[in-house]
Amino acid sequence: MAGLTFKVVLLGEGRVGKTSLISRYVSNSFDDKEASTVQANMYSSKAVPINDTNGAPGSVSEVNLALWDTAGQERFHALAPMYYRNADGAIIVYDVTDADTLRKVRTWAKELYAVVGEGNIQLVLCGNKMDTPASEQEVAEGEGASVAAELGASHFFASAKTGQNVADVFSAMATQILRSREAAGRGVSVGNSGGGGGLTPARSRPRRGLMVVTEDGEAFAPGRGSPNEGRIYGGVAPPRAHRYGTNGGGNRGQPITFNDEEDGVAAANSGSNASGGCC
């Protein structure tokens, strides 16, 4: 079946579990000693089911997601917006055991909107680590849902460790993107993506210049001095993205390095066509 592929970025503070959520969904694995992401990694997902398919002839029942896992650490923060370009959706992750990571969700959303424009991207907000004891949780599910409502996003509590609700997060993301494209009058019937499971047609919205938003809501252009020391983009080496394949046993293989986001998207396209493809 010829399919559709959408670009989805995961963002949020460091150590909230973005990589672990992807690993759980793509390869059903979890490593409690997962190394922090450096700059960005790209993963080709398996087919993601659409939640509300009507089963009509020609309707889309599943799509592929090219998942971009961005670094949340402060020293890489200025680089992350480079990977937001042309994203169809974003999953903003916070840690239910750390209320500060929820408070910073609004900053991540502002930074995302500075690049793609508000209203041009579908959002899902995910509170990870719901498996932790209630006594260790600092965020109630209702608090996360309230922030999600402000952003017009879906909200889930999930656990990358146990897998609870993880599939629902990605399925909701895929469904929102598909339905938003239908509502906008963009064709999404099977096979209209150029045949052979390639990327969806180029979006009509114009590319925007790269902007970074600080925690106080101030936006600045890369290459200019940031209000915070150490955030001068010109002093940071150009980022590279990595795509991980598998060895057939669910373990990630050696990374393939790409020079920029466009090469990574092309790799997602080729990966979705491979008969024994990754992940």
Image (cartoon, rainbow, N blue to C red):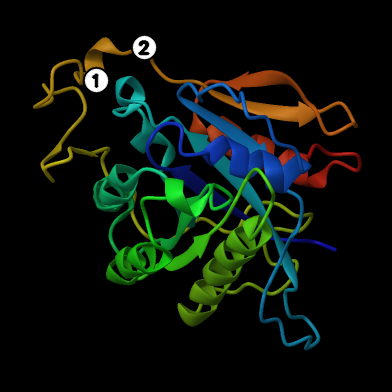
Residue ID at (60%, 70%): 175
Q: Nearer the viewer, residue 202 or 93?
A: 93
Judging by the rendered image, the residue that carries numbered circle 2 is 237
Circle 2 packing at 10 Å, graded few (<14), some (14-19), many (20+), is few
Residue 202's disc is none
Q: In the rendered structure, which amino acid carries the disc numbered 2?
A: Ala
Q: In the rendered structure, which amino acid carries the disc numbered 1?
A: Tyr
On the picture, is 207 further left or further right than 250? left
Q: Quadrant of residue 166?
A: bottom right
Work out which quarter of the rendered image holds the N terminus and state it: bottom right
Please provide percent x and percent y for residue 131: 59, 50
Circle 1 packing at 10 Å, graded few (<14), some (14-19), many (20+), is some
Please provide percent x and percent y for residue 2: 80, 61
Label 2, secondary structure: give it.
loop
Residue ID at (54%, 78%): 182
Rendered position, 46 above or below 231? below
Residue 233's disc is 1
Counting the numbered discs, the total is: 2
Question: Alpha carbon of mark 1 to alpha carbon of mark 2: how far?
Answer: 8 Å
* Residue 96 shows up from this direction: no
